[in-house]
Amino acid sequence: MRFGHILHALYCEPWLIDPAMHQQLRQIVDAHITGKAHAPDGNILDFNDKSGKAPDLKVVDGVAIVSLVGVVGKRIGMMEKSSGVMDVDDLSDNIQAALDRDDVRGILLDVNSPGGTITGVPEAADMVVEAASMKPVVAFTDTLMASAAYWIAVGADAIVATQSASIGSIGVYSAMLDSSVAFSNAGLKQELFKEGAFKAMGIQGLPLTAEQREHIQERVTKIYEWFTSSVIEARVQVSKDSMQGQTFRGADAKAANLIDQIGSKDDAFDLLKELIG
């Protein structure tokens, strides 16, 4: 099935993402599957207009501008990239390229992302922490720095956001689709032969068992603890109350210690130049 791996991720894997974007992803995939991927004006339904190619590293006055844009995932195919999904491996490659260049003295992480899947995100976050130990790193957003994107950015030396930007959404969830009632109403009955309590968990037409539900919740809780521990390690003044899946606008994000400064991209540049010295 062409969309099998995407459907599995959407409905079976834990997500670090703004829920509204997750719902939009579902709508896009459903539209492609049903052949309704075109709007009335003929345009392809999408959530970002991307070429499918990772952005080239841009250097301005010794500052490398590394973009973190769109839903994030790992080992993303061309179809997903053309829909605005960013591969964390491309992000890490650009950070490494910035570290390798002698003419780069600092890194500006320019973020506009609702988050994404868990796979590859902690490693990308570690890459930012490592980069910040070698060259100054400032993360900036004038739109959205949510969930997985915040996890990646939190290891920067400082975070700057505009007053109207949305920051946070620190949380994890896994949305499983129970289609057993729909199967029953359609006169269908799913028969499953398996070994292993968690094998074929979430398969269409069958409800989850209590043991499976407990397993999913345990996995989500562990990822949440991993996420929040990384945030607290980088920003010790962030409270548990600010990490309940909600997003904050600029001033409230600063009050919650999620960011360091409210300002424009120019302000982020100025702060980075101060750190460069």
Image: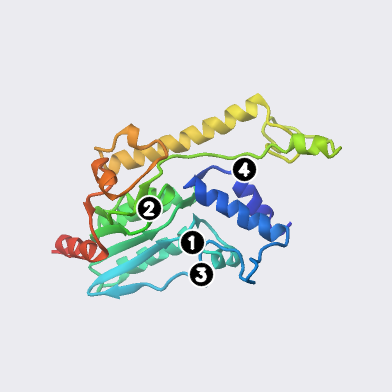
Residue projecting furthest to the top: 210
Badge 1 is on which residue?
86
Q: Label 2, label 4: how many angstroms apart (C-alpha)?
A: 24 Å
At x 71%, y 58%, the residue is 33
Q: Find out whether the residues at labels 1 and 2 contact each other: C-beta distance under 8 Å.
A: no
Mark 2 / mark 4, whichever is N-terminal:
4
Distance from the alpha carbon under mark 1 to that under mark 2: 14 Å
Task: Please tell me whether residue 245 is drawn above or below residue 162 in the rendered image.
Answer: above
Residue 135: % across, % down: 24, 61
Q: Is residue 65 above or below residue 114?
A: below
| Marks 1, 3: nearer the viewer | 3
Residue at the spot x=38%, y=64% of the render? 67
1 or 2: mark nearer the eye: 2
Q: What amino acid is labelled 3 in the image?
A: Lys
Q: Nearer the viewer, mark 2 or mark 4?
A: 2
Mark 1 / mark 3, whichever is N-terminal: 3
Q: Which percent across, then down, holds residue 258?
A: 29, 45
Which of disc 2 and disc 3 is earlier in sequence?
3
Q: Secondary structure at mark 4?
A: helix
Q: CA distance from mark 1 to mark 3?
A: 10 Å
Q: Are marks 2 and 4 in contact (CB under 8 Å)?
A: no
Mark 2, residue position: 145
> Which residue bears the numbered disc 4?
12
Residues at discs 1 and 3 in contact (Cβ within 8 Å): no
Rendered image: mark on residue 50: 3
Label 2 neighbour load within 10 Å: few <14, some 14-19, many 20+: many
Work out whether mark 1 precedes mark 2 in sequence or the reverse, and give the earlier one: 1
Does 132 sit above or below residue 241?
below
